[in-house]
Image (cartoon, rainbow, N blue to C red):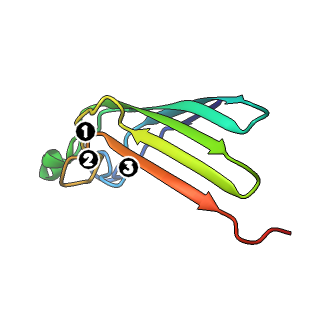
């Protein structure tokens, strides 16, 4: 299990307005389980991002709403040379826009990978 959080503050000294470059607060946690002698790993990741408001009037269109995303992942070591990975990002297909991005982020994304080691020590 891991837990990470970020909180950054920054204000213009002259106007006391929040700086545009300061990202919103974020909390992320990952919970994973291992099975079959650590060959199979299953897990879930939760990302919570706070709203970004209180920007200078010229940047009001950059404000974002708070959102939470859930990712699911699995990894399986078939043997010492072959590994399969699978991840579902934004599992509940939430619509969000990351801070300072002009367009909304993609909804549900599924990725699979197969890694093969051709040389070992």
Q: Would you say residue 1 is visible in this rendering? A: yes
Residue 73: give its label.
none
Q: Identify the residue at horizontal 30%, vertical 33% (top origin).
A: 51
Q: Single out the mark in the foreground, 3 or 2.
A: 2
Residue corresponding to mark 1: 96
Please say if 106 is above or below 3.
below
Sequence-wise first label, 3 or 1: 3
- Say what secondary structure mark 1 lies in: loop
| Disc 3 and disc 2 in contact, CB within 8 angstroms | no
Residue corresponding to mark 2: 105
Instruction: Please tell me how crowded label 2 is: few (under 14), some (14-19), or many (20+) other residues with Cα within 10 Å.
Output: few
Q: Position of residue 19 (x, y in %)?
A: 32, 51
**Quadrant holding the N terminus:** top right
Residue extending furthest toward the front: 78
Quarter assignment of residue 101: bottom left
Sequence-wise first label, 3 or 2: 3
Residue corresponding to mark 3: 22
Q: Position of residue 69 (x, y in %)?
A: 37, 32
Q: Return the residue nearer the eye: 86 or 17.
A: 86
**Quadrant holding the C terminus:** bottom right
Sequence-wise first label, 1 or 2: 1
| Disc 1 and disc 2 in contact, CB within 8 angstroms | yes
| Disc 3 and disc 1 in contact, CB within 8 angstroms | no
Q: Position of residue 67 (x, y in %)?
A: 31, 31
Please say if 82 is above or below 60.
below
Instruction: Please tell me how crowded label 1 is: few (under 14), some (14-19), or many (20+) other residues with Cα within 10 Å.
Output: some
- Say what secondary structure mark 2 lies in: loop
Residue extending furthest toward the right: 121
Disc 3 to disc 2, C-alpha distance: 19 Å
């Amino acid at each position: 299990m891991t837990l990470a959080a970020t909180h950054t503050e920054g204000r213009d000294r002259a106007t006391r307005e929040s700086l545009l470059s300061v990202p919103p607060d974020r909390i992320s946690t990952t919970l994973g389980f291992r099975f079959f002698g650590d060959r199979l790993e299953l897990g879930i990741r939760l990302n919570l991002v706070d709203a970004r408001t209180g920007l200078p009037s010229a940047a009001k269109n950059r404000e974002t709403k708070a959102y939470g995303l859930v990712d699911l992942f699995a990894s399986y070591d078939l043997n010492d040379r072959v590994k399969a990975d699978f991840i579902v990002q934004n599992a509940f297909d939430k619509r969000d826009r990351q801070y300072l991005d002009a367009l909304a982020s993609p909804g549900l994304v599924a990725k699979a990978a197969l890694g093969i080691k051709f040389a070992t020590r």
